[in-house]
Image (cartoon, rainbow, N blue to C red):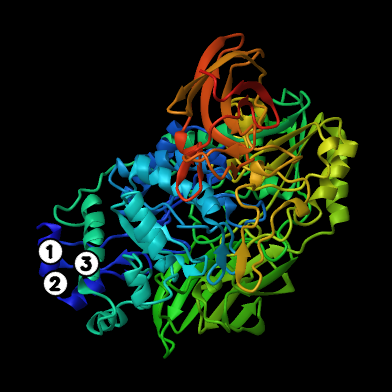
Amino acid sequence: MDIEKAIERLDLARKVRLLTGSALFALHDEPEIGLASLKLSDGPTGVRGAELRGGTIACVLPNATLLAQHWDTALAREVGEVLADEAAAQQVHVVLGPTINLHRTALGGRLFEAYSEDPLLTAAIAAAYVRGLQDKGIAATPKHYVANESETERRTASMVLDEKTLREVYLLPFEIVVEDAAPWAIMAAYNNVNGVPATEHTELVEGVLRGEWGFDGLVMSDWFATKSTAASANGGLDLAMPGPGGPWEDKLVAAVEAGEVAESTINDHLARLLLLASRTGAFGEQRSWPQDLPAPDSPLRREQLRRFAAGGMTVLKNSGVLPLQDNSVALIGRHAIDTVAQGGGSAGVRPPHVISIADGLTSQLGDAVSVVDGVEVRLRYAAPGAGVLKDIRATTYDADGEVLATRDMEIAELAAYGGWAQGAASIEVSGEVVLDEPTRLLIGVRGFGDWTIDVGGRQYATLLAWANGIVEEALLKPPHWTTEVLLSPGDRITARVREASALVGLITQPVPRSPADAIGAAVRSAREADVAVVVVGLTEEQETEGFDKTTLALPGEQDALVAAVAAAARRTVVVVNAATPVLMPWLAEVDAVLWAGLPGQEAGDAVAAALLGHIEPAGRLVTTFPRADADALDLVPVNGELVYSEGTAFGYRGATDPLFWFGHGLGYTTWEYGAAELSVVEGAVGSVSVELTNTGERAGREVVQVYLRPRDETVRLVDDTQPQRDETVRLVGFATADVAPGETVRVEVPCDPRAQRVWHDGWHPLTGGDVLIARGLGDVRVTLPADQE
């Protein structure tokens, strides 16, 4: 049955029913027209499935910035192919990614999900990712359209920016991905854009996305982002998520019957939904899901994920200590033992395992490694369970106290909304503490609701009230309650909550020891080893959906830990387990810094491979690192508005003396740039070629970066009037090269004309200026005039 005939067979109510979800991550089926239920899943770096917590075991890939630090579109495509297999294994039709918002400021809490601060690099990586997914029949959903670069007040704030900035910077990644990869869906953002909600922004959806760019796919809302009925339906939104309920359904039927929305508009929305279903095998001829796909912990997947992670890690500083030799190593820090694999928020995935850095390095060096815990890094609570609980169970009850369901759990946390526990009158979570002797622990609960807690025969009660009714807040940042209790081996913690809102779980963690004790133990270990490797970083508290950071400083006393170890050790290497910039007051005192990102499930093995040189950490930074908090743009809206007053001059475009430049990365060899030339095509730089020599003793991978810097600070418009100032340098092309030691190759770098335009009542070419061939903007190797023939 074709789409037009299918629509003709449905009455208005049945049409509208299909335009809202049937569940948190599923759509309605319609057997009469051969439409199966479409399944969706969060998935920037892993396909989670329908459960918000404790669902299907799936691959946890390195986070988006770590993947982007390869600057490699072939690898990005391979990432998309892995995720397509992961989706197919769960019979998921639509993956909600990639995230192609930009790193406007290092304070953004959700930057770990987004690729970079540069629109061209972001677009190139994202387009390859989309092709990798969709060539295997799984829909990609680039998000969040548009100007969703921060999380503070994201549901209500209006992003205020001029058209030049919007077009040249924030729309550009979407434009290139639509043109180069033709995604089958796009997700509209929570925020307003210049006063208009993104979910009902006719100018940007119907005018730019569909009209100018020719996008023929489906536009869905972010979850709970739709703010109106008629305005969103008329503004170009095709699918309001999640469901059931929300501002469409019966309200949209009434709006059509009242003449506020034309039924032809409903038909257009449904046609695009059916096109998506057809492309993914849910409409018409049903797809046959592949069998025997690699398991998340299969040798193939583990090799891929280790390579994805280690190869994107970035050597920020190295005084000859890396790669590590056969020396004794003092491995220090909480992140070495409790390595953070992924960020917080909706994209969290249940991995088959997470290899800690301690386990990864010890597996390679054995007794040469001594492991010492560091200072406390989790300021609010530990991860659920945190290795302290076993025999974890969850039970749901109806209003009469009768059991609805019981499940064994791997972690002491579950979703009361959108999962198997939804609708329960009360939920009980319990687990047995894992102890060798009586120990004082911090125990508690997290999640809105009326709690009773039984701990080793002692009873507690607490009410964590849910005042505003915002489901996403209850999911992303639930409140918590803790108390310190002396527990014995075999004691069981049982917590029961009534009127649970969204996310519920137990908190169990050792009582933190004092920073002075932790630092003292670290210093003693560092003095006895040849090399001290200190692992520091952020946690899901700082890098998470829904909330921005207020500082770039490492949490807790980690800076003091590094300084003390550096003063005591012969040589000190710092590994940073974080996706986004941090302050480094100790930088001059240490011998090397390895930026490890959030490395996914193979974290420890990948870090070990990078430290030992088994895989070159050849990554290049995708974000400019500020020297101080004051150098990062503020993210707090004023009177509901967040003004992008910096225009196009953000990140590397506006930086003067950053801690580390965009594109920086040392790798494990040295490079010499030789003769270079460029071609000009229709007034734009078409390509640049340069001789590249590996002057080191190891094979290495180089990222040749090409930037355009306006020389006369003006752009001539077509009619040669009204010179338009444009002083910002911009990336226009990049290419990678793997080169043996002593070898010279010629690298050809294609340059994208879409990055060489300025907007002034339409597009105009950026002419003249200088072409910079660089290893990052802090290390420019060749400069050529842009207009040479």
Q: Which residue is labeled 2 in the image?
A: 10
Q: Of helix, strand and loop, which one carries label 3? A: loop
Q: Which residue is labeled 1 in the image?
A: 6
Q: Of helix, strand and loop, which one carries label 2? A: loop
- Image coordinates of residue 755 in percent, x first then y, are 50, 38
Q: Distance of mark 2 from mark 3, alpha carbons?
A: 13 Å
Quick check: 502 left or right of 543?
left
Front position in the image: 229 or 358: 229
Badge 3: residue crowd in 10 Å (few <14, some 14–19, many ≥20): some
Choose mark 2 or mark 3, whichever is in front: 2
Badge 2: residue crowd in 10 Å (few <14, some 14–19, many ≥20): some
Give the position of the N terminus as an image quadrant.
bottom left
- Image coordinates of residue 178 in percent, x first then y, are 37, 46
Which callout, 1 or 3, points at the residue further toward the start of the chain?
Answer: 1
Q: Is residue 690 above or below residue 157?
A: above
Front position in the image: 696 or 414: 696
**Residue 553 in view, yes or no:** no
Q: Which residue is labeled 3 in the image?
A: 29
Q: Is residue 632 above or below residue 754?
A: below
Which callout, 2 or 3, points at the residue further toward the start of the chain?
Answer: 2
Quick check: 418 left or right of 735?
left
